[in-house]
Amino acid sequence: MARVPFLLLIEDDDAVRTALEMGLTRQGHRVVTAASGEDGLKLLREQRPDLIVLDVMLPGIDGFEVCRRIRRTDQLPIILLTARSDDIDVVVGLESGADDYVVKPVQGRVLDARIRAVMRRGEREANDSAAFGSLVIDRSAMTVTKNGEDLQLTPTELRLLLELSRRPGQALSRQQLLRLVWEHDYLGDSRLVDACVQRLRAKVEDVPSSPTLIRTVRGVGYRLDAPS
Amino acid sequence: MRDWLVGVMPSLRLRLVIVFALVALSAAVAASGIAYWLTRDAVLTRAQTAALDDFRKTLGDHAGTLPPRPTCEQLQDAAVAMSRSTQNYEVLLIDRQRDGQRCAVTSSGAFSLDDVPPKLQRAVGERRKSSGEGKGAAYHLYWQRVAQGDTPYLLSGATVIGDGPTGYMRKSLEPERDDLTSLAWSLAIATGLALIGSVLLAQAAASTVLRPVQRLGEAARRLGEGKLDTRLKVSGTDELADLSRTFNATAAALEERVADLSAREQASRRFVADMSHELRTPLTAISAVTEVLEDEQENLDPMIEPAVQLVISETRRLNDLVENLMEVTRFDAGTARLVLDNVDVADQVTACIDARAWLDAVELDAERGIIARLDPRRLDVILANLIGNALKHGGSPVRVSVRTEECPEAHAETAEPGTGKLVIEVSDNGPGIPEEVLPHVFDRFYKASASRPRSEGSGLGLSIALENAHIHGGEITARNSPEGGAVFTLELPQDPSRLAAAADEEGDDR
């Protein structure tokens, strides 16, 4: 993992774009920038970055829409940059498929920490695999198959599934999951977990509305069960 | 209805009834009195005149037929003959007989000279200077009304001129009295009827006046409760309709004014909210660049290093201020939402202290295992503000204690664990808060004293902490401890889910 993270920054405000590019470059990232959603999507296809930092308020197609379009084809991590920490923005952003969000005015260090945390989620680890019903998690290949078919998971979804599968049958609180998956050391937003669980259920469960694998434990958090 | 009676009767309605009754009573009594007096006068005068005229005539007739010095028998016959008149009176005749004896005879045994008042006897007996003119001067006829027993009588007497007999007559006025009594009864009944009628009229008048008044009162009460669209239906052109119109105009003006004021307030809040939003974008750029400067600080020219340092610290201050302004506008606009999660309170407090490098300055008295359902980010904001404030103004060590209390009025139906209260106390060792400042510590931009050196705070911290407690359904109170030092007590319900049922949208599989 000596590779320099390659980021795509989509931000319409020139000053913010320049400043963030400057800051992120100094933190050791390679950064390409786009001033609009359309340009960003084009750069994504041409340059294949490792991660996207995406502003919500964009002229033309907005950040949420960009996020949804990326998710149709790609599972690369997306961090939303929102000027409004209004709850509806965060909820819509997470539902659109963002992995994490930071609120403007953002501290460069916080953004850097989030970027590195997201990047770490894709790292490979101990080579073993586990099966939960028709779901097979291959930790060495970092792949998940359901009924033999490869599932397209984002690194965050994959990491969440891995953390849950490491402790099968044991309930993990949202704060625990935030520390394990998002590396938010404290006061993480539990909606990140809820939104990611919803997305994950949509991919791994037979019937997402009545989950049999990732169960909600009321008053605690979530638990991964092998279907009996 | 009872309330209505109690409310209305002792006031306007009763007053109206009393005034109406008094007016009717005095009018009726005056009219009846005058009528009675006039009638009585007319009836008595007529009866009296008829009787006196008749007596005068018969006395004249019979006295003329009597011989001078008549015998008692002749007098008796004359008296009986006189009393046979249509006027139905008793007659007493007195004359001197030949032997000089006085003889008094009556037409009936019930009438004697004792019944004639001495005053009348004297008047009748008195010899008058005769004017000698006309027939009217032939007699001196005197009369008097007296009551003997309970019967009213007309007594009259005259002496026949030329040494004739003295005659008295007594006529009972009982029929007249009976007539007058029945008249008085009729008048009294009429007065009573007028009184009853006036009371009924007063009731009706009171109702016509009081019903609109009551409606007006009801409308005014609703207006006072803040229902500014309250209007009255105006009918008629009387004073009450006029009052209703005035009320409607006032309510309309008030509504307009309130709408105008709230629109202005909303506009100014919106302005603050928009401005903080607008400030964020340049601030994001500045912050990012500031960090670059910060990293390069040691490589900078010593001459400009302090300037860069100032830019860095002030940018951070500006950041905090805008952040707090955003937070305040969210509370003002009511868009702040709880994101509830079950957390270990001790862990949260530790994390909050740890993240701000306050571990050395804070004594924590909290057991792990106290689980509360709350918004961890908001708890962190509250704690950071309370502890930060204590460190800034009170000085270390700051003591933070966490405990739970069972609600005394715990709802029986929800008597599950977690219905209690979470109590977090933050106390410092400083000089405490002056009494006059204590009520204002949670006010926005309130600085404890003008002479106090400018603090790094935004002036919004405690206000935001309080708002964050309120949104949980909790409370923060400030007091001075007897041992010195300020104590801030945060109380939060252990499970505020009822407040934020909507915020808890987690998937719920059975």
Image (cartoon, rainbow, N blue to C red):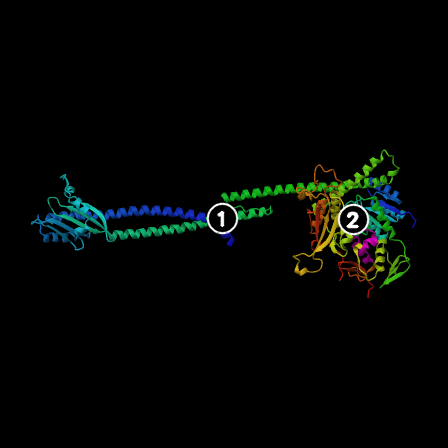
Left or right: where B177 falls relative to B357: left
Q: Predominant secondary structure in magenta?
A: helix
Secondary structure beneath label 1: helix
Measured as percent of width and height from the top left, residue B497 is found at: 71, 55
Measured as percent of width and height from the top left, residue B42 is found at: 26, 46
Determine contact: label 2, label 1, CB under 8 Å: no
- Asked if residue A13 shows in the view, the reply is no
Q: Earlier in the sequence, mark 2 or mark 1?
A: 1
Please tell me which residue lies in front, B291 or B46.
B291
Residue under numbered circle 2: B353
Measured as percent of width and height from the top left, residue B407 is found at: 67, 56
Q: Amino acid at mark 2?
A: Ile
Residue under numbered circle 1: B210
Q: Amino acid at mark 1?
A: Leu
> Pointer 1 indicates a residue of which chain?
B
Question: Magenta region: which residues?
Answer: A176-203
Left or right: where B25 falls relative to A130: left
Seen as rendered, the residue at the extreme right is: A2
Gap in Å between the C-alphas at discs 2 and 1? 68 Å
Secondary structure beneath label 2: helix
Q: Quadrant of residue B258?
A: top right
Please tell me which residue lies in front, B297 or B193.
B297
